[in-house]
């Protein structure tokens, strides 16, 4: 790219319009309701703070990513926009992707679990159905209804997933009531017999005197990152920005699993200190091993203090602190890592493989 | 979207014609039913696995689907319109069917079934006719190597009945039979899967803590205690208890009585784990006993005796097989396998499949069928009518023939191009074309006015042997110019002589 045509590529990157403003290389759509604040927090944690001059505006930028324009859309529209290609990347709910996806929709999944906005799409029945504890019971009741000449009425905003789930569980006789209003009230109002709805804490179900049943989880969902296949496959600059986004997300998400611990230990030499730190369980002495550096005493003189730093998995925090103490550390300071980059960005490599997998192309 | 292009389309049509023509020789007559059907037609039994693979939709509040197979449609037609005909009613059909599955080589979401149904005859004579027609049709189509796999659902159904497994459980086990027997599924995984779908066994793996605790749905103390009161008494006791606790059963669309009586009935059901395991074990044994008829009959006979099962199904197969040689049918290979399930749940007795031995890298099955004596009743008929049939998967059969390198008749080639030079020549050219078609020639009229050279080049490229030029001179003399592409000669003829020349040259 550098040797062949440096100037055009640069101009592509920051295409200057006649009026002098830069056009954007890549557009990313974020969910505007429900998941909005969580998404903004998540991106900020990943070092991609969204700069939105006015909360009523539907456009914003991410200063850390040059050439990126942010659009706020309803979560279902995020999927539609990515599918049609008017935006390149989008964050939406995994449940929405599953409900709206088509074989030929041109959407690729970049990261299907961003670790927030967790919920589940479940089948729920009235609490009063004390004879019903599993989806099999619901199947039997559907058959019973059928003998009485009527269908099981299922209220849901997810007709596709609901239909597939019911068929998969041997429930053939049903009608999906695609109500968009207060779904949870439908059984009490006798507008439906059971519902298929999103549940996060379960409080709404309980308040409406509904309960989940065994085997009734249709999709476990959380926020996910999707992209337009053609845009990421054919436009290398867009793909490069996608790589940066994935690098930051992956390294940030991985960093949640690690702490960095530092303790001052007195010893004859760095080697001697290292030996003491590594003498306990190997897994407590850092991923590769401790880093030992000399501490220079404030008052001058040399009392042989060294700082030993280890990076350990979060679940090993307390054992690792004990191990450092045993090695002679008095005070131990702990820092949660901000990012943990590995030698490669796995999610980006997975994306590239997906982009070149043509088996699903029509 | 999978198009059948020329000459592929002609080959498939030719194959269809060969098969249906063969069926006609046995007295079967053609029937055609709509591609679009009422969804209900295919949802007779709950848990029918095909439901999830249908293209179904609601159009103006009517539930419709694209037919996933043809037997149910044919039987609907029989029930509504053919019941006054003398039995057996013999019909054959061909048409597109639709199933939403992952496309693979030899498996498309739209595929063509070509088959027949023999309605109103039971017994080995009818079975043998259907089996023999399938085999001889495959041979007639040009297939050399194929294997006939014969099974009989009567054996497994007997065992399930003997074990006292209810209809829902029977359907689930039969639905898993295919996976057990053909795809090498592990019985230790199938048993829990069936049990989970029956609503028993360990369901902890499917749910998390959010599900209401305490009620595993079976044999908890209260319901089993209630069961001891007998169903009616128990319902009263339960309702009374709930009322005393000031608990109102708000069941939405279900009454408290319905809920309590079902709870009690559920508690009264015995734990089916052991029986399901025995059924699955039996299917595995059946599969192991499969093989060439002589050996398989011995092994299966012993197995049936051991389980106190009626050997009648085995005798039915034996007798049907013994009649095949009289039809002149000697399948290269016959295998008897009583664990053969077939995907569809309407079969009740004999089932069979034809497999091409020459195909690699895809499923080798080219045809399948069997006996379905209860389908008429489940479609609303008053009595059960014995019936038996099969269908070929046309695209599969064609791939099997391709694999054997069989020559299939492709498109007929066009024999003559009639080429008017300018607009004024059109009328003469059209009339001449019509006359040539009248004597049985395939004639292409040049509607693009390509000119003499253009038409010669076109005929050359497409391998069309004759070009007739109609220009101003030919029109005025009444003598079109005939170009023989192979001999590279040109001659003007009177129209009569021209037609005669081309007719005899054909």
Image (cartoon, rainbow, N blue to C red):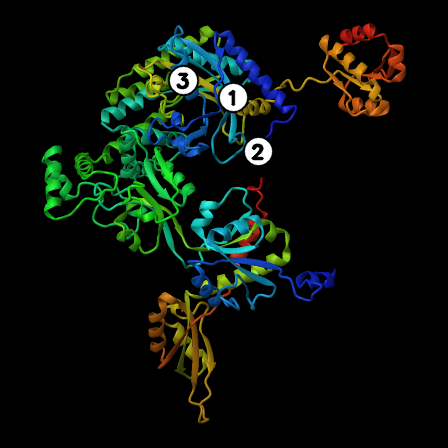
Relative to A263, residue A146 above or below: above
Q: Chain of mark 1?
A: B
Q: Position of residue B254 (x, y in %)?
A: 23, 38
Residue A234, position in %: x, y? 63, 51
Q: CA distance from mark 1 to mark 2?
A: 17 Å
N-terminal label among 1 and 2: 2
- Assess disc 1: are there few (<14), some (14-19) or many (≥20) residues with their C-alpha within 10 Å of its C-alpha: some
Pointer 1 with pointer 2, Cβ within 8 A: no
Crowding at dot 3, Cα within 10 Å, few <14 / some 14-19 / many 20+, comes out as: many
Taking B268 as reference, is B377 left or right?
right
At a point 31% along the width and 21% down the height, the residue shown is: B155
Label 1 and label 3 in one chain: yes
B11 left or right, relative to B41? right
According to the picture, the residue beneath numbered tag 2 turns out to be: B1
Q: Say whether mark 2 and mark 1 are on the same chain.
A: yes
The answer to whether residue B292 of the structure is visible from this angle is no
């Amino acid at each position: 790219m550098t040797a062949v045509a440096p100037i055009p590529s640069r101009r592509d990157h920051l295409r200057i319009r006649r009026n002098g403003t830069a056009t954007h290389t890549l557009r990313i759509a974020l969910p505007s309701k429900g998941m909005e604040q969580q998404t903004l927090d998540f991106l900020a944690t990943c070092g991609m703070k969204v700069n939105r001059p006015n909360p009523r505006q539907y456009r914003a930028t991410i200063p850390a990513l040059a050439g990126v324009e942010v659009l706020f859309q309803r979560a279902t529209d995020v999927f539609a926009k990515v599918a049609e290609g008017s935006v390149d990347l989008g964050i939406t709910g995994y449940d929405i992707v599953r409900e709206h996806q088509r074989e030929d929709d041109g959407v690729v999944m970049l990261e299907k679990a961003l670790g927030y906005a967790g919920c589940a799409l479940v089948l729920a029945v009235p609490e009063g159905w004390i004879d019903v504890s599993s989806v099999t019971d619901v199947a039997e009741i559907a058959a019973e209804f059928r003998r009485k000449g009527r269908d099981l009425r299922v209220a849901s905003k997810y007709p596709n997933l609901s239909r597939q789930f019911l068929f998969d569980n041997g429930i053939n006789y049903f009608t999906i009531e695609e109500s968009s209003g207060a779904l949870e009230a439908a059984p009490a109002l006798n507008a439906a017999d059971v519902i298929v709805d999103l549940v996060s804490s379960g409080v709404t179900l309980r308040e409406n005197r509904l309960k989940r049943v065994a085997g009734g989880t249709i999709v476990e969902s959380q926020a996910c990152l999707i992209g337009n296949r053609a845009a990421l496959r054919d436009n290398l600059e867009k793909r490069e920005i996608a790589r940066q986004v994935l690098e930051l997300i992956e390294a940030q998400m991985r960093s949640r699993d690690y702490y960095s611990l530092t303790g001052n230990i007195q010893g004859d030499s760095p080697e001697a200190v290292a030996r003491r730190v590594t003498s306990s369980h190997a897994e407590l002495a850092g991923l590769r091993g401790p880093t030992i550096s000399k501490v220079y005493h404030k008052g001058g003189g040399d009392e042989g203090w060294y700082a030993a730093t280890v990076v350990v998995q979060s679940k090993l925090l307390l054992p690792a602190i004990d191990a450092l103490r045993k090695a002679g550390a008095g005070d131990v300071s702990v820092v949660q890592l901000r990012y943990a980059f590995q030698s490669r960005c796995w999610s980006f490599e997975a994306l590239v493989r997906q982009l070149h997998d043509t088996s699903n192309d029509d | 979207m999978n198009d059948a292009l020329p000459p592929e389309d002609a080959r498939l049509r030719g194959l269809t014609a060969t098969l249906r023509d063969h069926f006609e020789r046995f007295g079967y007559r053609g029937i055609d039913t709509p591609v679009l059907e009422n969804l209900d037609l295919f949802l007779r039994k709950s848990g029918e696995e095909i439901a999830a693979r249908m293209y179904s939709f609601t159009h103006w509040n009517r539930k419709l689907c694209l037919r996933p197979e043809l037997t149910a449609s044919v039987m609907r037609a029989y029930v509504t319109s053919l019941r006054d005909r003398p039995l057996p009613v013999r019909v054959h059909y061909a048409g597109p069917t639709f199933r939403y599955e992952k496309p693979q080589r030899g498996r498309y979401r739209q595929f063509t079934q070509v088959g027949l149904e023999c309605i109103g005859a039971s017994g080995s004579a009818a079975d043998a006719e259907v089996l023999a027609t399938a085999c001889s049709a495959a041979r007639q189509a040009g297939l050399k190597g194929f294997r006939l796999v014969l099974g009989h659902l009567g054996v497994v159904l007997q065992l399930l009945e003997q074990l006292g497994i209810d209809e829902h459980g029977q359907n689930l086990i039969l639905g898993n039979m295919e996976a057990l027997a053909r795809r090498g599924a592990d019985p230790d995984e199938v048993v829990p899967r069936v049990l989970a779908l029956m609503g028993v066994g360990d369901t902890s793996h499917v749910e998390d803590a959010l599900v209401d605790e305490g009620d595993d749905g079976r044999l908890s103390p209260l319901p089993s205690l209630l069961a001891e009161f007998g169903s009616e008494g128990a319902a009263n006791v339960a309702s009374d208890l709930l009322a005393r606790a000031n608990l109102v059963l708000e069941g939405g669309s279900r009454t408290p009585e319905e809920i309590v009586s079902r709870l009690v009935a559920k508690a009264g059901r015995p734990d089916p784990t052991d029986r399901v395991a025995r059924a699955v074990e039996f299917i595995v044994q059946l599969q192991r006993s499969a093989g060439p008829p002589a050996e398989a009959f011995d092994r299966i006979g012993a197995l049936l005796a051991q389980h106190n099962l009626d050997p009648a199904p085995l005798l039915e197969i034996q007798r049907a097989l013994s009649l095949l040689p009289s039809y002149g049918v000697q399948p290269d290979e016959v295998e008897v396998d009583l664990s053969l399930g077939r995907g569809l749940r309407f079969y009740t007795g004999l089932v069979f499949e034809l497999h091409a031995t020459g195909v690699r890298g895809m499923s080798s099955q080219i045809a399948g069928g069997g006996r379905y004596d209860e389908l008429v009743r489940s479609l609303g008929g008053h009595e059960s009518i014995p019936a038996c049939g099969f269908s070929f998967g046309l695209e599969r059969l064609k791939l099997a023939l391709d694999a054997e390198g069989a020559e299939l008749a492709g498109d007929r080639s066009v024999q003559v191009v009639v080429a008017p030079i300018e607009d004024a020549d059109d009328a003469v050219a059209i009339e001449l074309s019509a006359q040539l078609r009248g004597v049985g020639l395939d004639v292409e009229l040049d509607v693009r006015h390509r000119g003499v050279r253009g038409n010669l080049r076109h005929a050359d490229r497409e391998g069309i042997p004759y070009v007739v030029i109609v220009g101003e001179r030919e029109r005025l003399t009444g003598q079109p110019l005939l170009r023989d592409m192979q001999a590279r000669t040109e001659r003007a003829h009177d129209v009569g002589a021209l037609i005669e020349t081309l007719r005899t040259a054909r």
